[in-house]
């Protein structure tokens, strides 16, 4: 394979409440920066094409795929990863056994936190609608839905 | 995952600067808006991916305005914003409906209407709605501004009336009138986040129970989105009845030329196209004749 020279630039953004400055290739994805430069490995690389949702993070508070977001698009913005999402979401997944291999779980947790930030008490239909961008190949989804239902209307 | 670590990305701070850069690097830069399709394409590319002009930071291209019965949408406006917009829900519900089907929540939050238009997939879900709304595209360059009707913008499969140095900045269309109704349909292989096998939009103008005007656009059944002109002619001047809508649905076959691909055969697409047109017209008939 042909080798191309690598460019690097400096990027500045807020990550989980803190200001971050990184040197990275401007064509790197946010996912590559998180995992390979910042060693924040909670966010997973699943399909690399925006189908599975394993790499979901919040960009300015909205769920997006970090595998389809270049670091250049993040400059000056706020990123929240699974490491900084309210623990009660992951706890609900654990309590309901909504985890088997666990690879999809960080993406589900972030997508769930995003759903709860948009609506306090989602219906079953709304939960399915809002989590349609996240795939799980183990659990069959029932326990995941139960975990999210347990959070609906929760003031805690 | 194939890394794009070797490409350079230019990030202008204003539209003016973006147009300067496009002019200076004519034909050398690909424009990065939301990136939900472009980044996948670049990773798949066999050759060296081009450097990018990252316009994602240009908030001046994010807006939805209702201005003198014209709806104006900035090219960077994402589909979540479009589908949730009270202006779009009220004055172009057919576009709100189409926007909601484009992909998962994560895709809707990032994918832009301008990206969907310039990416020019024949299966793009916003396009049939924009066709029936008679949308106009605003193209800016360093030297001026040009407007093109959306139907004139597509010259063939992924062939656009877009010069190097030009950037799509706005989509506009007349607000729907009281006596117009619009519906969007999409047939994918699963419910969520699927590429359309067939999609389409219908806009009817009804006066005293008769169809005064009909516009039908179909996607994923030809190299570009197409108007189903024979179907439209079958409807205009008629009262909607099961007989009329069946004839109109069948008449679409003269307008479409689908291909076989992984999502469906040409024959399947033809059948689905007729069926969906019939089903959608049937629902609209119920709304009109209530």
Image (tube, rainbow, N blue to C red):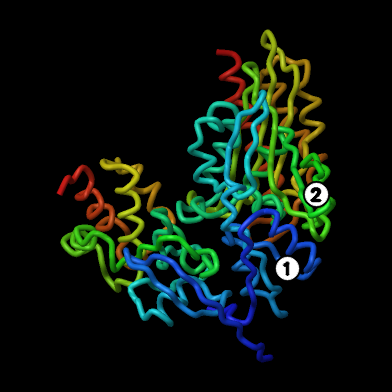
Nearer to the camera, A140 or B148: B148
Nearer to the camera, B92 or B187: B92
The residues tagged by marks 2 and 1 sit, at their Cα atoms, a distance apart of 21 Å
Q: Chain of mark 1?
A: B
Q: Is residue A18 left or right of residue B212?
A: left
Where B102 falls versus B56 (above or below)? above
Q: Position of residue B177 (x, y in %)?
A: 65, 20
Q: Is residue B210 left or right of residue B196?
A: right
Q: Position of residue B157 (x, y in %)?
A: 79, 56
Q: Earlier in the sequence, mark 2 or mark 1?
A: 1
* Mark 2, secondary structure of its residue: strand
Q: Residue at coordinates 55% horizontally, 53% vertically from top-left? A: B189
Q: Residue at coordinates 60% horizontally, 39% vertically from top-left? A: B185
Image disc number at residue B29: 1
Q: Which residue is mark 2?
A: B154
Between disc 2 and disc 1, the foreground one is 1
């Amino acid at each position: 394979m042909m080798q191309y020279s690598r460019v690097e630039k400096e990027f500045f953004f807020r990550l989980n409440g803190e200001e971050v400055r990184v040197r990275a290739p401007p064509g790197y994805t946010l996912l590559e920066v998180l995992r390979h430069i910042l060693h924040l490995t909670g966010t997973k690389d699943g399909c690399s094409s925006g189908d599975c949702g394993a790499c979901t993070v919040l960009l300015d508070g909205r769920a997006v795929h970090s595998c389809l977001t270049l670091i250049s698009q993040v400059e000056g913005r706020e990123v929240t990863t699974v490491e900084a999402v309210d623990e009660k979401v992951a706890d609900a997944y654990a309590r309901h056994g909504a985890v088997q291999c666990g690879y999809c779980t960080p993406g589900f947790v972030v997508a769930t936190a995003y759903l709860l930030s948009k609506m306090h008490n989602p219906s079953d239909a709304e939960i399915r609608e809002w989590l349609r961008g996240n795939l799980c190949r183990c659990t069959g989804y029932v326990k995941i839905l139960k975990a999210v239902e347990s959070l609906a209307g929760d003031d805690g | 995952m194939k890394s794009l670590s070797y490409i350079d990305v230019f990030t202008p701070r204003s539209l003016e600067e973006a147009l300067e850069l496009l002019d200076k690097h004519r034909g050398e830069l690909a424009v990065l808006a939301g990136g939900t399709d472009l980044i996948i394409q670049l990773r798949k590319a066999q050759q060296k991916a081009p450097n990018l002009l990252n316009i994602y930071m240009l908030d001046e291209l994010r807006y939805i305005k209702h201005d003198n019965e014209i709806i104006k949408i900035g090219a960077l406006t994402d589909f979540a914003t479009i589908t949730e917009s009270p202006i779009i829900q009220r004055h172009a519900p057919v576009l709100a409906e189409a926007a909601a089907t484009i992909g998962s929540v994560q895709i809707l939050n990032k994918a832009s209407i301008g990206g969907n238009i310039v990416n020019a997939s024949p299966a793009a879900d916003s396009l049939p709605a924009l066709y029936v709304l008679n949308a106009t595209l605003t193209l800016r360059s360093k030297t001026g501004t040009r407007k093109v009707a959306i139907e004139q913008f597509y010259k063939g499969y992924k062939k656009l009336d877009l010069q190097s140095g030009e950037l799509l900045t706005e989509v506009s269309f007349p607000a729907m009138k009281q006596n117009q109704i619009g519906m969007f349909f999409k047939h994918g292989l699963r419910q969520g986040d699927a590429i359309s096998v067939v999609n389409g939009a219908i806009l009817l103008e009804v006066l005293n129970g008769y169809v005064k005007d009909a516009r039908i656009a179909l996607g994923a059944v030809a190299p570009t989105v197409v108007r189903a002109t024979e179907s439209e002619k079958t409807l205009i001047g008629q009262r909607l009845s099961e007989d009329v809508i069946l004839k109109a649905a069948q008449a679409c076959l003269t307008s479409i030329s689908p291909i076989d691909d992984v999502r469906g055969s040409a024959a399947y697409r033809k059948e689905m196209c007729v069926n969906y047109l019939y089903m959608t017209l049937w629902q609209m008939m119920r709304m009109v004749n209530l």
